[in-house]
Amino acid sequence: MAILSDTWIREAATTRGMIEPFVEAQRREGCISYGLSSYGYDARVADEFKIFTNVDSAVVDPKDFAANSFVDRKTDVCVIPPNSFALARTVEYFRVPRDVLVICLGKSTYARCGIIVNVTPLEPEWEGHVTLEFSNTTPLPAKIYANEGACQFLFLKGEQPCETSYADRAGKYMGQRGVTLPRL
């Protein structure tokens, strides 16, 4: 597997709609950087957040997820309580080619503040807004800035196209829009 360069990412984004909207160069003046980088793409977090709250003493259960475990906020700055987390989504909509796997890493700016960004791999032929999880590992409230960089996606090209893609098996998160909660 080879990591794909800015040249490949730009071509796939502009001619095949792999990333929409696509920002062709790093933007960073006065904000957490986003856009095309040397071997990846720094995506932005949208202004829709689901902030974990334990007001109802809920148990986090991926097989029976209680929607009342979260409060919804549409805001430019999301404040995550200490030792808690929030779900959000990327501004960008992704369409992954059949011969590519995409992995994601958090931005160092957030990591240096004790904020961890978690995203599972984007599988071949998956498409949608990416649901992001921000974990605040600190004992203090933490801020997340909407419409600024949140994480970097790295594109890995397989030696050959996969036999069965995410689309082929009709994956449950295919085509998701907005912040998507766990599904069975």
Image (cartoon, rainbow, N blue to C red):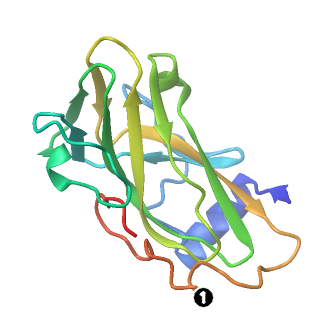
- Which quarter of the rendered picture does the N terminus lie within? bottom right
Q: Residue at x 28, y 62 (%)?
A: 178
Write down the residue under mark 1: 168
**Residue 142 is drawn in which quadrant?**
top left
> Residue 83 placed where, x, y %?
33, 22
Q: In this view, does 41 lie to the left or right of 162?
A: left
Q: Is residue 53 above or below residue 163?
A: above
**Residue 147 is drawn in which quadrant?**
top left
> Residue 130 placed where, x, y %?
43, 58
Q: Is residue 14 left or right of residue 155?
A: left
> Residue 108 placed where, x, y %?
55, 25
Neighbourhood count class around disc 1 (C-alpha, 10 Å): few under 14, some 14–19, many 20 upward: few
Q: In this view, does 183 lie to the left or right of 50?
A: right
Q: Is mark 1 on a helix, strand or loop?
A: loop
Q: Residue at x 50, y 42 (%)?
A: 118
Q: Residue at x 86, y 77 (%)?
A: 160
Q: Residue at x 31, y 28 (%)?
A: 84
> Residue 157 placed where, x, y %?
79, 65
| Residue type indicated by callout 1 | Asp
Give 50 or 42, whichever is nearer the viewer.
Answer: 50
Q: In this view, does 7 lie to the left or right of 130?
A: right
- Which quarter of the rendered picture does the C terminus lie within? bottom left
Q: How many labels does the image show?
A: 1
Q: Residue furthest bottom?
A: 168
Q: Which residue lies furthest to the left in this view?
A: 55
Give 132 or 70, whichever is nearer the viewer.
Answer: 70
**Residue 70 is drawn in which quadrant?**
top left
